[in-house]
Amino acid sequence: MPVSIMIATFTGCYYDNAELLYGETKVVNCTTISAKFNADVNPIIQTKCATSGCHDAATGSGGAILVTYTQIAALSVRINQRCVVEQTMPETGPLPPAEIAIIKCWIDSGSPNN
């Protein structure tokens, strides 16, 4: 077998490892995390997401306005994907782990208006 075929064979094969591909996976215990909308979630959204030029009422970047409970709850699946799973939002960098956990637990509990 020519060396080039052997190299292509061995370098083309790998085992997907979610932790290596997507970073360390953190298990969040939502029974120990406060996830109230008014006290915990909304302050994060208002200071990190609904800022000028991003998801405020004037800009609505990507068609997403995150000012009221109704707007935030309606986009909770998208918020979960971008902030918790992919950690690509906010654009300034991922939220701290404690804030990600709060948002995750709030969404996992059905995004209540509490």
Image: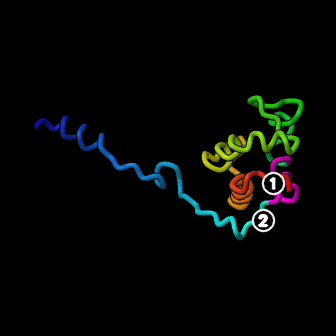
18, 112: nearer the viewer: 112
Distance (Cα) linking label 1 and label 2: 9 Å
- Secondary structure mostly seen in magenta is helix
Q: Is residue 44 magenta?
A: yes
Q: Is residue 25 above or below residue 60?
A: below
| Displayed quadrant of residue 77 | top right
- Please give the range of residues in magenta: 36-46
Amino acid under label 1?
Val
Q: Is residue 47 above or below residue 53?
A: below
Quick check: marks 1 and 2 in contact, CB under 8 Å? no
6, 106: nearer the viewer: 106
Q: How many marks?
A: 2
- From the image, tell me which residue sits under label 1: 41
Q: Is residue 64 magenta?
A: no
Q: Position of residue 91 (x, y in %)?
A: 71, 41
Q: Position of residue 104 (x, y in %)?
A: 69, 55
Mark 1: few, some, or many residues within 10 Å (few <14, many ≥20)? many
| Displayed quadrant of residue 38 | bottom right
Q: Position of residue 75 (x, y in %)?
A: 75, 40
- From the image, tell me which residue sits under label 2: 34
Locate the N terminus and report the quarter of the image it occupies. Answer: top left
Q: Is residue 97 above or below residue 92?
A: below
- The structure residue drawn at horizontal position 67% and vertical position 47%, both measured from the top left corner, is 80
Amino acid under label 2?
Ser
Q: Is residue 26 above or below residue 72?
A: below
- The structure residue drawn at horizontal position 86% and vertical position 36%, both measured from the top left corner, is 56
Relative side of 70 to 13, left or right: right
